[in-house]
Amino acid sequence: MKKNVVALIVFILLTGTLQINNVKAVADVTNPTLESIQVDKTEATVGDTVKVSVKATDDVGISRVRLYYKTPITNKSVYVSMNYNPTTGMYEGSIPIQSNSESGTYKVNYVTIYDSSENQISVWDWDGPDNKLSGGEFTVTGTTEADITKPTLESIQVDKSKATINDTVKVSVKATDDVGISRVRLYYKTPITNKSVYVSMNYNPTRGMYEGSIPIQSNSESGTYKVSYVTIYDTSENQISVWDWDDPDNKLSGGEFTVTGTTVSPNYKNMRTFTVRIANGRIS
Ligand SMILES: [Ca+2]
Ligand SMILES: [Ca+2]
């Protein structure tokens, strides 16, 4: 019994010492280096796959590489998943060219390289001409079905312009796109404290509109709620935002509604808040 305890203590001491030495031995404070980026073809068309390879070095070891391209027309950032190929000693990714891929020259937007201690280095396309990213360029031709047109906000409407406690205001957004809308994000601004409130919007196929609900509760701020901004995305991640301060056609005003009868009136602004602390069942 006693022997076992001694053995355990010796074990703990030994492993503790070993761990400390181990940490000291592998402390890695040096960032990795990007050596080069290359593609297996500089011209591509529908049905091709462009293989991109990143060579990186580190004093200890590379753990992963994150690579983003920029599309030639809409300048969207596109993530390319990179995996280590032990045969070539490089990180490799594939970019399939489809009929709806944008035509033109694809350039690397940025690459981030991590070593095994999470030290990292990022190289950006604006880092200058010697940034080593140009090796990743390739040009796509012969694709004609890319969606490069942003969606349009047609209108916003509410089912009631006046509301009180226990009402639910239903807000509807009509949006169009040459291909298709994927989602709508809508934010209201509260009348007193000007807080931005997100309203979840879901597509109603019967009405062809995105719809959301705003329940009015006793503690809702009273006054006029206005749309702060709406962002509409198409199925190719093209997006348009309409803001309350940049709405020349006054399309957001259709979303306005006024709340009365709730306890949070304009005087609420002037109320003081304080915290009551309860300890051992007594207010302290
Ligand atoms: Ca390192
Ligand atoms: Ca579109």
Image (cartoon, helix red, strand yellow):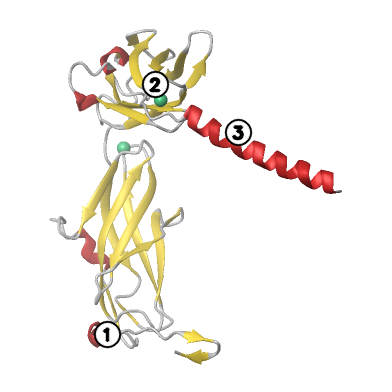
The residue that mark 3 highlights is 18
Which residue corresponds to the image point at 32% horizontal and 21% vertical from the top-left?
144
Q: Which mark is residue 154?
A: none
Which residue corresponds to the image point at 26% horizontal and 53% vertical from the top-left?
154
The percent coordinates of residue 132 (x first, y second) are 27, 16
Q: Between disc 3 and disc 2, whose residue precedes?
A: 3
The answer to whether residue 143 is above or below residue 268 is above
Q: CA distance from mark 2 to mark 1?
A: 57 Å
Residue nearest the observer in this picture, 217 or 270: 270
Q: Nearer the viewer, mark 2 or mark 1?
A: 1
Q: CA distance from mark 1 to mark 3?
A: 62 Å
Q: CA distance from mark 3 to mark 2?
A: 58 Å
Question: What's the residue type where badge 2 is placed?
Answer: Ser
The percent coordinates of residue 219 (x first, y second) are 38, 82
The residue that mark 1 highlights is 268
Residue nearest the observer in this picture, 265 or 183: 265
Q: Nearer the viewer, mark 3 or mark 2?
A: 3
The residue that mark 2 highlights is 99
The answer to whether residue 188 is above or below residue 126 is below
Question: What's the residue type where badge 1 is placed?
Answer: Tyr
The answer to whether residue 269 is above or below residue 175 is below
Residue nearest the observer in this picture, 208 or 162: 162
Question: What's the residue type where badge 3 is placed?
Answer: Leu
The percent coordinates of residue 102 (x first, y second) are 31, 24
Secondary element type, mark 1: helix
The percent coordinates of residue 47 (x first, y second) are 44, 14
Cβ of disc 2 within 8 Å of ligand 2? Answer: no
